[in-house]
Amino acid sequence: MMQRTIVKGQVIRLLPCLLILLFHSMAVFSQPFLTADGEVHSIKALEETYQDFNIPEDTEFGQFNLEIEGADGGWIEYTYLDRFGTKRTQRVNGGEGATVSATYRIGYGGGQLPPRSVLRLIIGNRGERAKFDLLSEGGYGAGGGGGSAALLSKDNGATWQIIMVAGGGGGGGVDTKEIDTKYNPGLPGSSGEDGLGGEHSKMEAMPGGIRGSGGQSSGITGGGGGVYEDGQHETGALYYGNAGWKDHKLSGQPLGGLGGTEKDCYNGGWGFGGGGSGAEGGGGGGGYSGGGGGTPGFGGGGGGSHINSFTAQPLTVSKKQNGDTNNPEHGRVRYQFAKTRQD
């Protein structure tokens, strides 16, 4: 009987194929599984990076509760002299990120979350906080917060679909004049899909984005990034929030977007999309659609929020617009596997 042997050259030619198969098999389930034990678990934001998890199988829990929060806009803290010459400190709040939640069924049926599918979490970073000592006359602003998002891949990361997005909050603003100082908190992430316009004293608000676009900027105060488009800006500028998934039409990976980073500004937070820079006003928050940049001395608008009922059909949904905060935080995610209710 003839024996077949593989010579050295054949092995060398086969090696790249074998390595590709090995790396693919390792990549399929290289990310950790979510914990299915009936308890509530929290996932914190990382610095400018996404987190992937597999949905477990063979679990007694048939439902999945998911809640995401957009990041908060930055606060402004400044000192001033009162009428007696005493130095005092004032803090102006940033807008809080929106809260979005839904309950899904786990399974292989239509509208369900399949076991072993991949859940990508892009958790927004808060806007940069601004500190000033004895402000001179003018307008000032902090950075807008990044939006947060959950996306699903049913083919091991080859393609992705959005499940939900929570808008980030706008940065706070301060307007100082010779005889008066007014402080204007950033606006919260919106419960609607469109971004909020920056607060203003005249009918000249910077509008928020619509249908996944970025918010408008006010001078070098940046508008927040939307899912698909950057905050609106001039060529060569860096003050705008970047889109969360700019190359989605090219089947690119959803990686999140940087916040505005213009020189001498206060940075917007990274997220889905990124928050705008704070300068003369508060930066707009990132989100499904970006928030508008605040006009001089006023807070930025919050980013929009969204739940996609086509990717997976939720049993219940909630979108909440919050307020403002003197302790801005990054976005966060909470989840829980629960037993299917028997009605």
Image (spheres, rainbow, N blue to C red):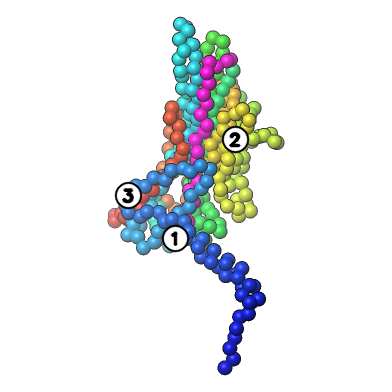
**Residue 278 against residue 116 in the figure, above or below:** above
**Residue 296 against residue 73 in the figure, above or below:** above
Residue at x 58% of width, y 32% of height: 277
Residue 20 location (% of width, % of height)? 58, 66
Number of labels in the image equals 3
Label 2: how many residues lie within 10 Å, few (<14), some (14-19) or many (20+)? many
Decide whether the magenta segment is chiefly helix, strand or loop. loop
On whether residue 296 falls in the magenta region, the answer is no
Marks 3 and 1, the one that precedes in the sequence: 3
Q: Nearer the viewer, mark 2 or mark 1?
A: 2
Disc 2 marks which amino acid? Gly
Q: Quadrant of the C terminus?
A: bottom left
Regarding residue 88, the answer to whether it shows in the image is: yes
Residue at x 50% of width, y 14% of height: 80
Regarding residue 147, the answer to whether it shows in the image is: no
* Range of residues picked out in magenta: 112-137
Q: Which residue lies most toward the right here?
A: 235
On whether residue 115 falls in the magenta region, the answer is yes
Q: Secondary structure at mark 2?
A: loop
Q: CA distance from mark 3 to mark 1?
A: 20 Å
Marks 2 and 3, the one that precedes in the sequence: 3
Query: Where is mark 2, residue-wise?
Result: 260
Q: Quadrant of the N terminus?
A: bottom right
Query: Where is mark 3, residue-wise?
Result: 39
Disc 1 marks which amino acid? Arg
Q: Is residue 42 left or right of residue 261?
A: left
Marks 2 and 1, the one that precedes in the sequence: 1
**Residue 195 against residue 154 in the figure, above or below:** above
Disc 3 marks which amino acid? Glu
Query: Where is mark 1, residue-wise?
Result: 116
Q: Secondary structure at mark 3?
A: loop
Quarter of the image for residue 159 reads bottom right
